[in-house]
Amino acid sequence: MVQIREKDLPGGRLLALAQSLKDAVQGSALLIVNDRADISQIVGASGVQLGEDGLTVSSVRSILGMEYLIGRSVHTAHGAGLAEKEGADFVVAGTMYTTRSHPGSVPAGPGLIENMVRDCSLPIIGIGGITPYNLAPVIRAGASGVAVISNVLGAQDPRRAAEELKQALQEAIRTTGTLGPSEQPTGGNGSA
């Protein structure tokens, strides 16, 4: 899954970027647009990722319909439970570890995922400071996957960094024997 997370990009430029990425990932990855249901719908992306204090899942669902994925960023087990009740398809939970994208934020660590899986059956994606060397505890805690920004975008060879993350993720999944509550979100009100 590729998420477009450009909070400060004007609408026209964001639309052009989304279309370019949609063309680039066609058939090989899902495309999610951060907070912009309109852009997601125009380019035919797979869905949207909503901030914890963003629009409600039901309001975005009324625009996009059931065929689009709707994710919610969460920082507490309570937030994950609310996202599930609202009808989100998955949650992105963080912050797992210290990260440059949220300086000064105190990491919750994989324990946050452990708390979430007790009361939330949605796929949970861990985010924040994820590297090939620290993602296994996140998966063992019950996450279905991980989201990565700096480890790939800040790498001298982003392709190699992504491959190393993929190998580490596959190994973590193999050794835990699970992908968490659900193997992969596919769309529509919590379906997997």
Image (spheres, rainbow, N blue to C red):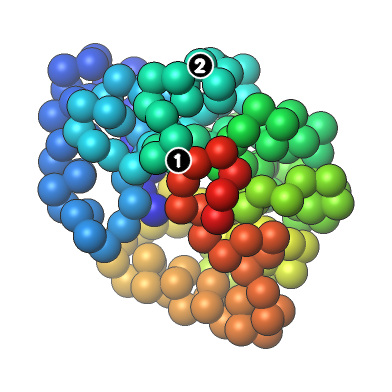
Q: Indicate the amino acid at tag 2.
A: Ser
Could you tell me which quadrant the C terminus lies in?
A: bottom right
Q: Quadrant of residue 51?
A: top right
Q: Nearer the viewer, residue 79 or 17?
A: 79
| 34 is higher (above) or lower (below) than 96 | above
Image position of 166 (left or right of 118): left
Q: Which residue is mark 2?
A: 59
Q: Which residue is mark 1?
A: 69
The numbered dot on residue 175 is: none
Q: Residue at x 34, y 51 (%)?
A: 30
Q: Residue at x 66, y 42 (%)?
A: 94
Q: Indicate the amino acid at tag 1.
A: Leu
User: x%, y% of residue 139?
Assistant: 67, 66
Residue 91 visible in the displayed image? yes
User: x%, y% of residue 68?
Assistant: 40, 38
Question: Label 2 crowding class (10 Å Cα cut-off): few <14, some 14-19, many 20+?
Answer: few
Q: Nearer the viewer, residue 167 or 157?
A: 167
User: x%, y% of residue 149?
Assistant: 44, 48
